[in-house]
Image: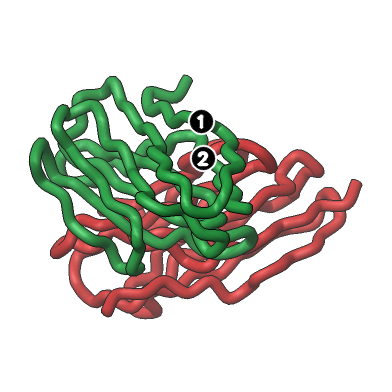
Chain colours: A green, B red
Amino acid sequence: EADIYQTPRYLVIGTGKKITLECSQTMGHDKMYWYQQDPGMELHLIHYSYGVNSTEKGDLSSESTVSRIRTEHFPLTLESARPSHTSQYLCASSSPGGGSGYTFGSGTRLTVV
Amino acid sequence: AQSVSQHNHHVILSEAASLELGCNYSYGGTVNLFWYVQYPGQHLQLLLKYFSGDPLVKGIKGFEAEFIKSKFSFNLRKPSVQWSDTAEYFCAVISGNTGKLIFGQGTTLQVKP
């Protein structure tokens, strides 16, 4: 049973709309991550956080932004969605040191029309 | 920069065939190594992981992987695949420096019944 939850599971939205993808975890992990995955492609880290009020850009440039006001919550926002943002977005969290691996949410598949 | 390379992009096997998926990484320091699996429509799940000790690691569902430090490799193996192993497989590395999980490009495995 997953301890990290993402909503919505699927989202189809028009160009120019503002959207927020939700991610919450119940494990008390300090470290949280957002990955972007295009179909059949590798996962790219776009944002990460090492704790409350800590956010960093990942290896892949993204127009999205994130916030970390509470340990358990790490939402991702697109101010103005575009078709190029169509992708799957995966949220993850890890224990201190990351050595035990990451726990992933089920993802949000975003389609911008 | 750190990178993870998976040699096989798409593999097609018949049931009961043996499987080996290649994975090489580029970081020379301390690494933690992982294989994740993503079944169709499901979230990423951890198959197995290597931190230290015995370089032959056994995971779930009969999978194993061997860490060969001199070759910077962490290949995934299964002696006899089943139709239910059809999925996407990702090799991933956490380096000691960054603590970030870096993924390979993924390998799509299709097992024919």
- Residue B70: image quadrant is bottom left
Is residue A79 or residue B16 the one in the foreground?
A79
Does residue A15 show up?
A: yes
Report the side of B110 relative to A32 (left or right).
right
Is residue A66 or residue B2 the one in the foreground?
A66
Give me the residue at 63% from left, 53% from top: A113
Give me the residue at 29% from left, 38% from top: A93
Between disc 1 and disc 2, whose residue precedes?
Answer: 1
Outermost right residue: B113
- Circles 1 and 2, Cβ within 8 Å, touching? The answer is yes
Q: Chain of mark 2?
A: A
Is residue B83 or residue A96 the one in the foreground?
A96
Residue beneath disc 2 = A108
Report the side of B96 relative to A81 (left or right).
left
Report the side of B11 relative to A22 (left or right).
right
Residue beneath disc 1 = A8
Residue B113 picture location, percent across and down: 91, 46
Secondary structure at badge 1 equals loop
Outermost left residue: A53
- Residue B11: image quadrant is bottom right
